[in-house]
Image: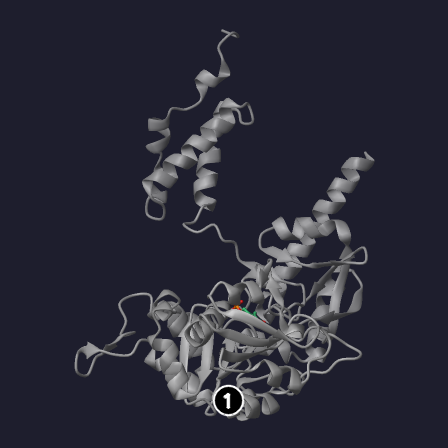
Amino acid sequence: MDDVDPRRLIPRTNDLLALPAVHQARSRLNERVIRDTVRQVQERARRGELAPSDVEPALVGALTARSATTLRPVLNATGVIVHTNLGRAPLSARAVEALVAASGYVDVELDLADGTRSRRGASARAALLAACPAAEDALVVNNGAAALVLATTALAAGREVVVSRGELVEIGAGFRLPDLIASTGAVLREVGTTNRTHLRDYADAVGPETGCVLKVHPSNFRVDGFTSAVGLGELSALAAGHGIPLVADLGSGLLAPDPHLPHEPDAATALGDGADVVIASGDKLLGGPQAGLLLGRREIIERLARHPLARAVRADKLALAALEATVAGDPPPVVRSLHADVGEVRRRTDTLARALGVPVVPHDGRVGGGGAPGVPLPGWALQLPEGIAALLRTGEPAVLPRVHDGSCLVDLRCVPEDDDHRILAAVRQALAALDGAGAGRAG
Ligand SMILES: *Cc1c(COP(=O)(O)O)cnc(C)c1O
């Protein structure tokens, strides 16, 4: 019977759905996902990519590998600490515990003592105020961009936002602060030039139409040379003289100065210098979940909290829980990576290099995520052939290295030490695969 179409031998859907492995998968996956997976495997057989006899094992393999989320954990071997494409800050163990605890019913907006509704996120707010006593009040929203939109909408919709031309930045993926601000109905009143802005430029622009003065930390680039900018102290005297709020968008999320990053602004200093509101992200240098922090004067924060838009950008309970635990807990991974002991990184890198027989080279890490541009974080990396990078990215575990100058570099700064053996295994496997491919080509 050689003329039987092999496609007729493809196992039927009902038979596949009755397999014990499929029954087991039902404890993790819903029926639609299981049926989709069955259909996909049958399709591969129909296209001739799979022999009919391989359909069953392929299905079992696909269902075993499939979890309810297909986001894949990645070991960050780039040396870039706040990597936006990798979800920015990895959470601390404390923050993970907090968000797991908050994943059920939780008193995020309830006073358990008297059973009445309470202010949402009161405990995250209290933790922020304890960590940044210069702030009278705090509000947490969805992210930094939402915080900026809320502040400019509530303070300046239909009026003007006075801002220096040198600070109209693009924050990434094509999002530009001027467009964001314009979308709120506020009019941008640009002052100064790209490289130099003086106090008199602000003074000339401020008037009855001004809703707020905005100072943005141009966090992801640096202008060197003939430059000048007006500090928050001077701006605050001007704004206060006109009774106009001064908003400082810091970007990074440092609550207090960090000696490792002397040029990075922080909330305590900005408020001390006279900013009425500071804006920062939760998942950059603070090392927490995605969130936008608004810290500052009580009456202004209350005004923002009462604005209808605040409801549209409110933080979810998981972010509030993780944020509180980040602010109150032991240093999160971002802070540990930033302050990593270079000698220790060297020792770990040497150990892997010896095991693999590959060289170690000096390598500068970066803060990333639009923080501390141009500030190198000296360290070390394994130097591997460039061709290995794709194998590392698609291996198990997935490892993201840095490809630079014809090499694939593996920097351990952002890798938890407990994962060194996983990096070793992943590199070993990828090197073997690369050798195999080379031998295949040569043969
Ligand atoms: C990162 C950044 C933002 C945007 O914050 P998100 O939390 O990413 O929304 C806004 N302003 C500045 C200066 C930034 O660096």
Q: Residue at x 51, y 91 (%)?
A: 240
Q: Percent x, y for residue 263?
A: 67, 83
Rate crowding at label 1 as few (under 14), some (14 to 19) or many (20 or more) other CA atoms within 10 Å.
some
Q: Of 93 and 23, which appears nearest the observer?
A: 93
Q: Position of residue 222 (x, y in %)?
A: 72, 74
Q: Judging from the image, what secondary structure is the residue with disc 1 in?
A: loop
Q: Is residue 21 visible?
A: no
Q: Is residue 13 left or right of residue 83?
A: left
Q: Residue at x 40, y 78 (%)?
A: 139
Q: Is mark 1 within 8 Å of ligand 1?
A: no
Q: Quadrant of the C terminus?
A: top right
Q: How is the image coloured?
A: one colour
Image location (x, y in percent) of residue 64: 44, 44
Amino acid type, mark 1: His
| Any part of residue 160 in sight | yes
Vertical side of 364 occupied by 126: above or below: below
In screen coordinates, is 431 left or right of 48? right
Ligand 1 is found in which quarter of the picture?
bottom right
- Residue at the image position 48 percent from the left and 10 percent from the top: 4
Residue for badge 1: 242
Q: Is residue 118 left or right of residue 400?
A: left
Q: How many numbered dots are placed on residues in this image?
A: 1
Q: Nearer the viewer, residue 5 or 24?
A: 5
Query: In x, y percent, where is residue 355?
Result: 73, 62
**Residue at (71% x, 48% y) in the render:** 432
As drawn, 62 above or below 409: above
Position of residue 7 in the picture relative to residue 411 (left or right): left
Vertical placement of residue 167 versus 424, above or below: below
